[in-house]
Amino acid sequence: MPDIGAPELIIILVAVLIIFGPGKLPDLGRTLGKSIREFRHSVQDVTDDSDDSATVAAAAPAPASAPAPAPTVNPNDPPVA
């Protein structure tokens, strides 16, 4: 991705100023700031939720397995040494 230098940034800002006008720029900046803040908050919530679920899964004890049935002894079998 190419770097955006000072000349490119000035051209973009002039184009935005022409399109929206000087009266709308504060509202546009405020709206953009709120959008970025909400996006970061949402990303933080998702990462916190995934960390919490991973922690809960790791901390949860493994389900207890049923004990193995006792072996049956057939009286006709020879004794095992």
Image (cartoon, rainbow, N blue to C red):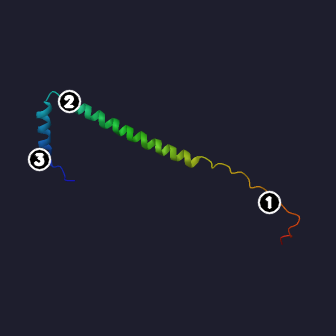
Image coords of residue 25 (percent x, y):
18, 31
Contact check, label 3 and label 1, Cβ < 8 Å: no
Q: Residues within 10 Å of mark 1 (few under 14, many from 20)?
A: few
Q: Position of residue 72 (x, y in %)?
A: 82, 59
**Which amino acid lies under the numbered mark 1 shown in the image of this protein?**
Pro
Give the spatial CA distance, label 1 vs label 2: 81 Å
SS type, badge 1 = loop
Residue projecting furthest to the right: 75
62 vs 23, left or right, is right
Q: Residue at x 47, y 41 (%)?
A: 49
Q: Nearer the viewer, residue 75 or 11?
A: 75
Give amino acid for label 3: Pro
Which picture quadrant has residue 21? Answer: top left
Q: CA distance from mark 2 to mark 3?
A: 22 Å
| Residue at the extreme bottom | 81
**Which residue in the structure is indicated by mark 2?**
26
Q: Position of residue 37 (x, y in %)?
A: 32, 36
For the residues carrying marks 1 and 2, which lies nearer the camera in this image? 1
Q: Which residue is mark 1?
A: 71
Q: Mark 2 near mark 3, Cβ–Cβ under 8 Å?
A: no
Classify residue 56 as left or right of residue 74: left
* Residue beneath disc 3: 7
Quadrant position of the C terminus in the picture = bottom right
Earlier residue among tags 2 and 3: 3
Going from N to C along the chain, the mark reached first, 3 or 1, is 3
Residue at 15% x, 49% y is: 5
**Mark 1 or mark 2, which has the lower sequence index?**
2
The residue depicted at 13 percent of the width and 30 percent of the height is 22
Disc 2 marks a residue whose amino acid type is: Pro
Q: How many numbered circles are shown?
A: 3
Q: Are marks 1 and 2 in contact (CB under 8 Å)?
A: no
